[in-house]
Image (cartoon, rainbow, N blue to C red):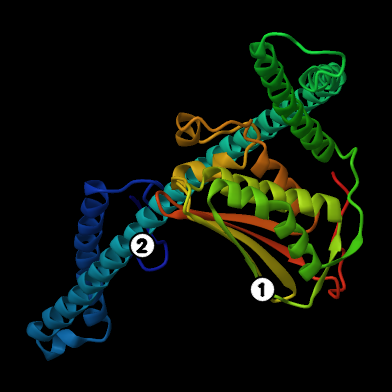
Amino acid sequence: MQSEGSPDNGIGRLVIWRPVGQSGAGSSTGIYLFSALCLLVFFSLGLNLAQAIDLVALGPQAAALLAATLGLLAFATACLWQMRDRALRAKLREATANLACDNRAEEKLERLQRAQRQLTQRYREAKSRAEAASRAKTAFLAHLSHDVRTPLNHIIGFADLLKHQAYGPLGDERYLAYVQDIKRSGERLLFSFSEILELAELESGSRVLQNEHIDVDEFLISLQDQFQSGASHCGVSLVVGGSTGVSLRGDRTCLLRMMANLLDNSLRYTPSGGKVSVMVWEAGDGVVLSVTDTGIGIPAERLEALSTPFALEDALVARGQGGMGLGLAIARTIAELSGGELVIQSTPAVGTTVAVSLPRADVEKQAVRPAA
């Protein structure tokens, strides 16, 4: 606070300032001090004003009343300033706190975004490595399957010659049983390697699917003729139904292989006295082919893994079922390359339904795409 004298009227002037940033108890003390000084100044001004307008002639009480009134006005003004100062300081503290929160939130968001970018990059790198490993595995198995098929064909061929004793009797009957075991084992191994080679060709894109006109009813008749005898031999009832009169466009050989894999799995895992149904119906702009069995079923947690190449259900292995777990993987790959989708629904001890949705031939879109 600084006081200066006025050369004009001799009335003192007060110049009051407060350093920026002062707050708390010091601010309140300054306000009260300012109020007291204002009261004194206005009281002095009131006395001078009373003398100037000759209010003393009216009596000393009138002069004192005027001075007191001016002092009260000064005090009220100071109180209002104090209230406004407190309100402004509260808003300033709130704004400062909000700004600090915003800064912390922005920093946290930036850290999260940075972590997300790092995780995305790691995911892409891991995915790239996994895809490269999968391609390398597929290429290796394809070469291995191709190299093994030739000697296996020779083994099966010579075993068949020995079985029919084309060049004379084998002697002991046990030799004939051994030869039959060799032939069956060779055929089973050849089938497994053929599956590996087929999956490798589909995944690598070396096999391009054809775009043929397929009559659905004739397609179902072919499936029934192919599997009716095997179903009867297993004691399983095979039912094929659903005449649609619609057509598909796709690779007939691949689609037959897809449905054959599904039917083979159903017949293999359905006990004697069970039932396998092949149904077809229209759904939107597509046709749905489904295979339903009353077999052992699959737990929900194993459904996704079951469509992965070389994945076998533990329960199936425990029951002595063979195979390399490629049937569903090949079927799913063919369905996707044909522009469709394969969905599996299963309940343990109740049965399994595998549905394949495929586009109709009259739908104006590419029904079959080349393997990627």
State left or right for residue 302 relative to residue 279.
left
Q: Which residue is mark 1?
A: 242
Estimate how packed mark 2 is, as few (under 14), some (14 to 19) or many (20 or more) residues with alpha carbons within 10 Å: few
Looking at the picture, how far across and down is residue 191, in whole percent? 74, 31
Looking at the picture, how far across and down is residue 297, in whole percent? 46, 48
Cα separation between marks 2 and 1 = 81 Å
Residue 261 versus residue 362 in the image, above or below: above
Instruction: Identify which residue is drawn at 74% across, 57% down.
Output: 225
State left or right for residue 369 relative to residue 68.
right
Q: Nearer the viewer, residue 152 or 61?
A: 152
Instruction: Identify which residue is drawn at 88% across, 50% down.
Output: 209
Residue 283 versus residue 59 in the image, above or below: above
Instruction: Identify which residue is drawn at 42% across, 67% down.
Output: 8
The numbered dot on residue 88 is 2
Q: Nearer the viewer, residue 132 or 301?
A: 301
**For numbered disc 1, what is the local secondary structure?**
loop
Asked if residue 14 shows in the view, the reply is no
Instruction: Identify which residue is drawn at 87% across, 40% down.
Output: 205
- Quarter of image, res 243: bottom right
Which of label 2 and label 1 is nearer to you?
1
- Marks 2,1: beta carbons within 8 A: no
Q: Amino acid at mark 2?
A: Leu
Looking at the picture, how far across and down is residue 147, in whole percent? 86, 18
